Image: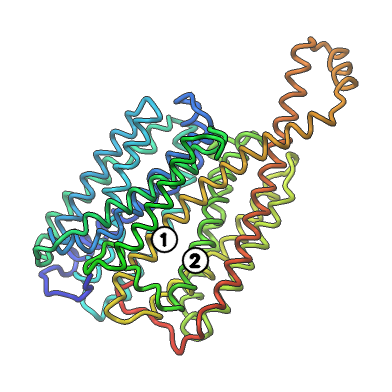
Amino acid sequence: MNAQTYPTSLQGTRLLIAAMLLALANFMVVLDMTIANVSLTHIAGGLAVSSSQGTWVITSYAVAEAICVPLTGWLANRFGTVRVFVVGLIGFTSFSILCGLSNSLAMLVICRIGQGLFGGPIMPLSQTLLMRIFPSEQHAKAMAIWSLTTVIGPILGPILGGTISDNLSWHWIFFINIPVGILCAVGVWRYLREAETDTFKLRMDAMGLALLVLWIGALQLMLDLGHEHDWFGSTFICSLAIIAILGFISFIIWESTESNPVVDIKIFRHLGFSSAVVALAFGFGAFFGCIVVIPQWLQSNIGYTASWAGYVTATMGFGSIMMSPLVAKWSTKYDPRAIASFGLIWLGGVTLMRAFWTNDADFWVVALPQFLQGFGVPMFFIPLSNLALASVLPQEIASAAGLMNFLRTIAGAIGASLAVTIWDDRSSMARNQIVSTLQPDATLTSLQENGFSHEVALGIVSDLVNKEALTVAVDHVFLLFTLLFFVAAALVWLAPKPQKVSIPKGAAH
């Protein structure tokens, strides 16, 4: 999408109000990516499902959003940027209401998909509209407003989610979107109608979109349901795997020959783009998998409330806020490959620290890696984004930005599914191993001598075994993600050294 500035009558207070409405809308959508992370225990308990099933609440939103992001440019050109933005806000708010009213996992997942589909275009379009209403000499100010909400959203998400779930109900993590959504929809329509873009009759790549939904949906279902159906021992899981593989191959062939593809995969011919995006996907998948599984472990094993799990998770935000402006400057002066590789190695080292957690870990043992992680996130995210977009032709910038965001979001959803799946499977294996070597007679006798019945004593021992198994399993997850971070750090160096890395204004969605 073109980020060119068009003359509008928005000046002074009206311009500031319009900018704040766009930033607030972006903040709301970004917030919903993480607000449910620390509330999964409450959601799973309230809907009487397992924690691994509760993860669908996160992955369904991420997958739906990722599918819709590549359509943003087509929708804006076909129906108008402001119209699509307002409709997205209305749809997102409506599905937020339905999410809050959900009384079953199926209903909640369906409504989260609706949230993701309508929320997908809001983030890139908020950036586009900010660039449109601000004069070119104030684009830096516009992007500062947009970037601030993008950084603060994931920080406040866990805190708000935990506080609301503990003190009210998990339903309210969705209801809080209602006033914000209504305010932004009404305000944007009132102030920004004059900034509407021209519309064109464009053909939709319906087959490409259908194949995209098919293979991503099958892959995500396979990852989410695999451990419940004995993986490839199940005909159902095998069928999903075959559909995902055949759908992916068909999608690649179709998009390679389509004149107006929904995802322009020809951009992968640029080695710098391919290397940066793959490294970004690996790194973000490992990063997002960690921030999904950590709050669940803290609540199930350490006894943290959702609020305290949110506080621990959010400590990484301080480092991110501090480092983001510095890394943005460094990435234009120094080799972005070195900065990104160092950032990924840093995240791998931090994740390795977590691999030695025990059930006796205190607050600072848990919070320190989170705090240190915040410094590493901008060091891999910003340089890789810059490197990827600087490696393509100018006319490919918009498509490259959409494809990069699409793969990053999909990687996050897959990382979350893998983290919970591996954690669940490894905990069962660890429990069996512990039980096979356990000699509980002395412990049972001691508990019974202290007044516990035999059944209660058995329950206490069983609970200790379960907790130990969960910790052994989560440490295994962290070891795997440590390896993934290091692999991503190596992949960065496949990109050729850039002459100068800079992003055209408004290109990075």
Horizontal side of residue 139 vs 42, given as left or right? left
Q: Nearer the viewer, residue 382 or 136?
A: 382
Q: Nearer the viewer, residue 425 or 57?
A: 425
Horizontal side of residue 438 vs 401, given as left or right? right
Residues at marks 1 and 2, CA–CA distance in whole angstroms = 9 Å
Q: Residues within 10 Å of mark 2 (few under 14, many from 20)?
A: many
Q: Which residue is mark 2?
A: 280
- Is residue 276 placed above or below 148 in the rendered structure? below
- Element on which disc 1 rests: helix
Figure coloring: rainbow
From the top left corner, tell me how far across and down residue 20 is, in percent.
27, 59
Residue type at mark 1? Leu
Q: Which residue is mark 1?
A: 407
From the top left corner, tell me how far across and down residue 359 is, in percent.
73, 39
Residue 43 visible in image: yes
Q: Earlier in the sequence, mark 1 or mark 2?
A: 2
